[in-house]
Image: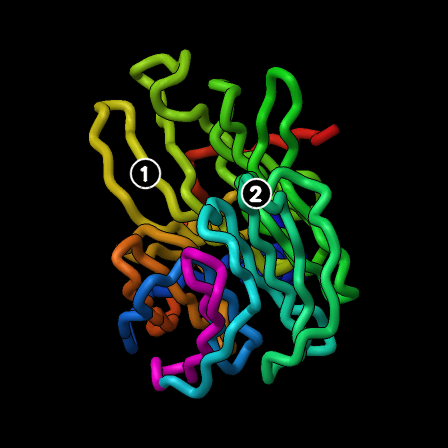
């Protein structure tokens, strides 16, 4: 059947409209934050919590130190930590220790303590805050530990399964259409299949940033952050692995194990390509 000029123009318009945008990333800045254990961005600046949970340091978008203040944490055995913002710019700091359990302290941006409350989730299994100041964490069920890696602005929660060999990453919410869902490496996956082990995730309504060790069917592995859009379309890669937080204008901050923070910014925009990793929705109970 021959398409009329009108039908052809509509088809081309649909193809153009649905073509994803892919970006390359350039490292714009990097700096060292001694003892960094967790970090978050309020869109303008980067806030870093030390490993022992005792101090918060603020940096501008290029790594210039702006301020530093004490959280009041006195425990010496902190093994879990997290930091995040609500829509009012209040900072929520979570620490977990064997002696004191898990606690969330709420601060003004200048370090003024507003209050504290118990954290009702296992502190080592993730910590997130939404715009309303609600807090979230992972689950420590009898046979299925899941770590909360991120919570998108659309409400999607991104988890890794720590005891389940079937998956490395799954999501509960609209963003589940953007995540790769191959099995975790080292599990029962056939050696001829792709697999990956996720380290961290950051997300917007239209993008998911997945820092992981990726292995292909030939067992050729590499560590990087991959950026996916709807339909698990691969939009770009950042050649670095670590904890993630997102800044303004598409900036991505990566916290390395050495305490180095790198800022990566999108540069050249090209046509995106669908990923071969597939998409699968998994409901989290």
Quadrant in the rendering for residue 31: bottom left
Q: Which mark is residue 99?
A: 2
- Left or right relative to 255: residue 19: right
272 over 145 or under it: above or below: below
Badge 1 is on which residue? 213
Q: Earlier in the sequence, mark 2 or mark 1?
A: 2
Q: Position of residue 73 (x, y in %)?
A: 55, 61
* Residue located at (50% from left, 58% from top): 20
Reply yes or no: does residue 226 show up in magenta.
no
The image position of residue 56, as x and y in percent, is 48, 72
Of the two numbered discs 2 and 1 in the rendering, the one whose residue sits closer to the viewer = 2
Q: Which portion, as a residue range, is magenta?
A: 48-64
Which element type, helix, strand or loop, lies under badge 1? strand
Q: Position of residue 138 (x, y in %)?
A: 63, 38
Q: Residues within 10 Å of mark 1 (few under 14, many from 20)?
A: some
| Relative depth, front residue between 205 and 82 | 82
């Amino acid at each position: 059947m021959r398409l009329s000029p009108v039908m052809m123009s509509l088809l081309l318009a649909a193809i153009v409209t649905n073509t994803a945008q892919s970006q390359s990333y350039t490292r714009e800045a990097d700096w060292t934050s001694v003892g960094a254990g967790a970090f978050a961005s309020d869109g303008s600046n980067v806030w870093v919590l030390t490993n022992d949970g005792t101090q918060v340091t603020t940096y501008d978008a290029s790594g210039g130190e702006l301020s530093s203040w004490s959280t009041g944490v006195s425990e010496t055995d902190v093994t879990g930590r997290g930091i995040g913002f609500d829509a009012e710019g209040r900072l929520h700091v979570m620490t977990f220790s064997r002696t004191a359990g898990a606690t969330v302290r709420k601060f003004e941006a200048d370090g003024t303590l507003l209050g504290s409350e118990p954290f009702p989730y296992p502190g080592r299994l993730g910590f997130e805050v939404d715009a309303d100041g609600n807090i979230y964490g992972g689950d420590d069920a009898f046979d299925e530990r899941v770590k909360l890696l991120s919570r998108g602005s659309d409400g999607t929660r991104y988890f890794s399964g720590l005891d389940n060999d079937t998956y490395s990453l799954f999501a509960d919410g609209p963003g589940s259409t953007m995540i790769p869902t191959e099995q975790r490496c080292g599990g029962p996956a056939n050696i001829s299949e792709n697999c990956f082990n996720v380290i961290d995730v950051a997300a917007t309504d239209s993008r998911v940033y997945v820092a992981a060790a990726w292995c292909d069917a030939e067992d050729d592995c590499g560590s990087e952050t991959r950026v996916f859009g709807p339909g698990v379309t691969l939009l770009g890669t950042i050649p670095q692995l670590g904890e993630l937080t997102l800044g303004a204008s598409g900036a991505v901050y990566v916290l390395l194990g050495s305490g180095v923070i790198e800022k990566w910014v999108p540069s050249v925009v090209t046509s995106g390509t669908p990923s071969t990793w597939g998409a699968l929705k998994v409901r989290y109970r």
